[in-house]
Amino acid sequence: VSLRPPPAMPFVVDASGKVAADGNQVTIREPASMSMHFNALWLEGPGLSPARPGPVAFAVDVLEGDSLWVGWADEDHFGAGWACKCLAYGGNLSDGGALLRAAFGPPLRAGSTVIVRGEWRPGPGAACLSVHVSVDGRGLGEAFCIDGEDGMGALHPVISFSTGPATARIRPVVPC
């Protein structure tokens, strides 16, 4: 089953019924809790994969709220709440289910702009996925370096909300 949205709607939202998408903007009106996340996957473009190694970059402008996470997920690992497995930045680094590194950079809040850049690089065996993050013009460096594909499909930008109300807008950027 494809998650592909209609052409005018590049976001797929999780099945929670709490996330609304309009063009390149996603909104949650209800508060989330530590036991729940609300997720949106941006399926504009072919995605990032070893067959299309990148680099690919996108920016997320936080228009309202705080406690947002942004990163990469594939369609097979996208879902509601903690079922969404991804490589995400929200101040800390997470795989969508566990903390991987605390205090990698500042938390995202209203007024923040985060740029996430992904690229598959050749490795000694399988390809290596490298993800860099910058927040408000400050490069934070390499957030993730994953060896091998481990059954991942094409990766697409994902936005996860830990609390609401919150609104974020996504846009492609030219990677540097």
Image (cartoon, rainbow, N blue to C red):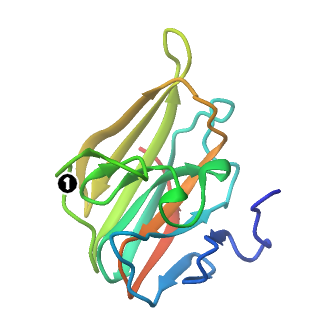
In this picture, residue 121 sits left or right of residue 6: left
In this picture, residue 125 sits left or right of residue 131: right
- State the image coordinates of residue 100 (x, y, percent, origin top left): 29, 43
Would you place residue 131 above or below residue 46 in this image?
A: above
- State the image coordinates of residue 103 (x, y, percent, origin top left): 16, 52
Would you place residue 71 above or below residue 127 in this image?
A: below
Question: Which residue sits at x=53%, y=23%?
Answer: 148
Three-letter code for the amino acid on which mark 1 is drawn: Gly
- State the image coordinates of residue 82 (x, y, percent, origin top left): 47, 60
For residue 20, what is the image quadrant?
A: bottom right
Outermost residue, right side: 1
- The residue nearer to you, when weighing 1 against 111, is 1
* Quadrant housing the N terminus: bottom right
- State the image coordinates of residue 19 (x, y, percent, origin top left): 55, 81
CA neighbours of label 1 inside 10 A, class few (<14), some (14 to 19), many (20+) = some
Outermost residue, front side: 35
Question: Which residue sits at x=75%, y=77%?
Answer: 8
Would you place residue 132 above or below residue 69 in this image?
A: above
Question: Which residue sits at x=50%, y=36%?
Answer: 119
- The residue nearer to you, when weighing 20 against 24, is 20
* Quadrant housing the C terminus: top left
Question: Which residue sits at x=32%, y=83%?
Answer: 65
In this picture, residue 144 sits left or right of residue 170: left
> In this figure, which residue is indicated by the disc labeled 1?
105
